[in-house]
Amino acid sequence: MTNRIHPTAILGPQVELGSNNVIGPYCVLQGAVVLGDDNFVAAHVSIGGGPEVRGHELSASWEDHDDRFGVTIGSRNVFKEFVAVNAGWVSESSVGDDGYFMGHVHLNHDACVGNEVTMSGHAVAAGHVTIDDGANIGLGAVIHQRRTVPAGAMIGMQAAVTTDLPPFVVSMGVPARPTRLNSFRLDKLAVTAVEQEALKAILLGDSTDTSALTTAVRAPVDAWLDRSHR
């Protein structure tokens, strides 16, 4: 199917679209933006704007060619009103598939966002932030630059993520601290009760024994153990 683009939307000369995308009124897609298939881009969304870095030279890339890093977005994502996804500064910004980004979400430069990520309204990710598959970011939460929100993590409303947190865990507060397993995501991944107990011992305790873990959760847990140097 062809793309449905509102006549008030502005697409720069480097924008590449897949098929069956909906791009709403007053959207601006600029610079080296690649958009996959079946994405819904609501009104007033900005994708590919220059990095918010003091001293970085900005350009009118909604009209002109820009050779700097852009944004690559997969398929079946929803970007609600006033979402902003900024272009990369030292590398490409990217969003995977099947994400849901509510109103006023901001993804700053060099963001790396996985698949099935949900970001609630007014959540903000600073530069160089990684958000892994299946993460859920609460209303008004903020993520400090160069932090990782790991797979299956849930960040509570208005939390401030200032350190890397464990996967498959609900973290809340300012600064955000792990509180309990994200059983909703684990149940969705068909992780058994026995395996969840093993995860609890590792992610919320001092255990490093991953022998009971299956492939559905093993890689993110191993990555967390490497980052935490346990």
Image (cartoon, helix red, strand yellow):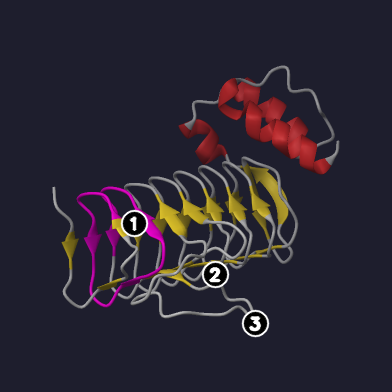
Q: Of the residues under marks 1 and 2, which one precedes in the sequence? A: 1
Residue occupied by mark 1: 78
Numbered mark located on residue 55 in the image: 3
Is 8 left or right of 190, judged from the image as shown? left
Is 28 left or right of 136, judged from the image as shown? left
Tag 3–tag 1 contact (CB < 8 Å) = no
Mark pair 3, 2: CA separation: 28 Å
Mark pair 1, 2: CA separation: 18 Å
* Range drawn in magenta: 17-41
The residue at the point 63 percent across, 45 percent down is 150
| Rendered location of residue 56, percent (x, y) | 61, 78
Residue 21 image-quadrant placement: bottom left
Is disc 2 surrounded by few (<14), some (14 to 19) or many (20+) residues within 10 Å? some
| Rendered location of residue 177, percent (x, y) | 73, 55
Name the amino acid type tagged 2: Gly
Is 118 left or right of 88, judged from the image as shown? left
